[in-house]
Image (spheres, helix red, strand yellow):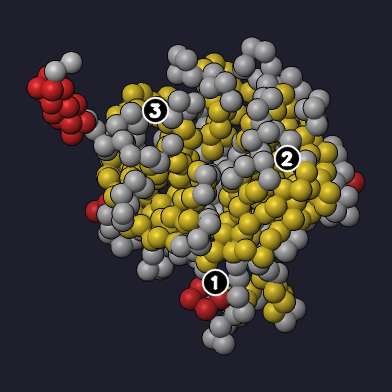
Amino acid sequence: MNKKLLQILTVAALMLFAAAPLCARPWGIVATQPDTINDPNLTNTESIHTIDFGQSPPAVYGPFLERQITPTDGAGVFDIVMLPGNKKALISTFGNSQVHLVDLKDPTLPVLLGSLDIPFFAEDIDITKDGKTAIVADGGFQSRVAFIDLKTFTLTSVFNLGDDKYANGVAISPKKIAIFPDYFQGKIHYGKINKMRNGLESVRTIALCDEGQTDNASLCEGVIGLPVNVTVSPDGRTALVAIANGDVLFAFEITGKGELIPGDPFMVTGLPGGPIPVGDDYRKGGNQSIAFQNNTTAYVISQRVGLPSPDTVVRNGQLEYPDADGVQPNQLCKLNILGPGRVHVETQRYTLLNDGSSQLFGVDTLAIFKRYALVGNPTVSVGGSPYFNYVAYIDLVTGVLTPIELNNFGIAAGVAIKP
């Protein structure tokens, strides 16, 4: 090859690179709720944002898909889950009961490929490891879950766990064990996805109590955990359950036969959420999202409470606490996985941007890729915070937290990272 031809080919390659869409890795994907409290004109403008972490500071793009995924007011966009291959994602919108398929091949220009109606409010989504099936769960009093064929993007079935069982979220293990937190009854339901990929072979139940008794919560001294989310380790051996009502989480070992057995310890203590005694009453924190960095390390968003303000008042027999004094910023806490179902809370913690003591059912508001964490909000009731329209990007090695503003638009809920 002569020198002149080599120069021509080099220039052509550089021009092609310059013309290609931005594709730095990794990218953040954020579900964004409109801040209608501060700006009533933002109705039905639920959207997504994308973030290029390959730039310094990270570059934010969006909002995208406004009035496409939620043409009616108040639908709410919550959960995001990446499909295998990381070029597409599923996104849930609650009030209009839909799941959306979005093309993210060019993260600077997401494209809505289609929308699928679900026969109940769609809040949480998870996908089987082979990328063939998605399961959708509601965040309310709903016993049914929806199965989606991802090859055709069609609703294949609606499966009933049982009229006495609620699915307030979903997580699927690599061996296709589907796990559902039941907030209203303090239980976990689980079962193996059948070969038809349209239901479960059977449904079993474990109550979140000290003894970890199965099948019947009345066997416990008292249910002490109100589960709002569940996460499974990459190797499929450990399941961690986030709860809304205290400074603990629950751990399970997933056996080779697909059974869940209480971890050792079953109730993992040491998170900074509470409870804090206040006279004859007490306040509790909670935790909403847990994400695994690998099979030996995970992180949890812990929602803290503080001592009440001196201005605490009693109305209608109930203590009231001004949020500005009674709720502390959330923290991201490190968990060591010592073995299947064996968890220890580390002292390493990162103070996050926002507060808030409520939770979104099943929505993953924490995503981890290698040494980095992307954090949304475990509740969208954060309008009083100065960082309500930010996400946090954390280097888990250096501890540096970068606040990223979402173009002064709205409140971050579910997040995902596109490698």
Q: Position of residue 86 (x, y in %)?
A: 43, 29
Q: Residues within 10 Å of mark 1 (few under 14, many from 20)?
A: many
Q: Are marks 2 and 3 in contact (CB under 8 Å)?
A: no
Tell me how far mark 2 sits from mark 3, CA to CA.
28 Å
- Earlier sequence position, callout 2 versus callout 3: 3
The answer to whether residue 251 is visible is yes
The circle drawn on residue 238 is 2
* Residue sitting nearer the eye, 130 or 65: 130
Number of on-image labels: 3
Amino acid beneath label 1? Gln
Residue on which the image places disc 1:
328
Q: Nearer the viewer, residue 107 or 399?
A: 399
User: Mark 3 — residue?
Assistant: 87
Task: Give me the residue at 64% from left, 31% from top.
Answer: 172
At horizontal 56% and vertical 76% (from top left) the residue drawn is: 326
- The single residue placed furthest to the top in the displayed view is 196
User: Given the current orientation, which residue lies at the most extreme bottom position?
Assistant: 310
Q: Amino acid at mark 2?
A: Thr
Q: Is residue 367 above or below residue 116?
A: below
At which x and y percent is residue 384? 40, 68
Residue lying at 53% horizontally and 22% vertically, measured from the top left: 131
Tell me how far mark 3 sits from mark 1, CA to CA: 37 Å
Q: Is residue 313 left or right of residue 238?
A: left
Q: Residue 65's image quarter?
A: top left
Marked residue nearer the N-terminal end (3 or 1): 3
Q: Position of residue 239 (x, y in %)?
A: 71, 41
Type of amino acid at the residue the image marks with label 3? Lys
- Given contact means CB atoms under 8 Å apart, are the residues at marks 3 and 1 in contact? no
The reply, left or right, for residue 132 in relation to residue 342 is left
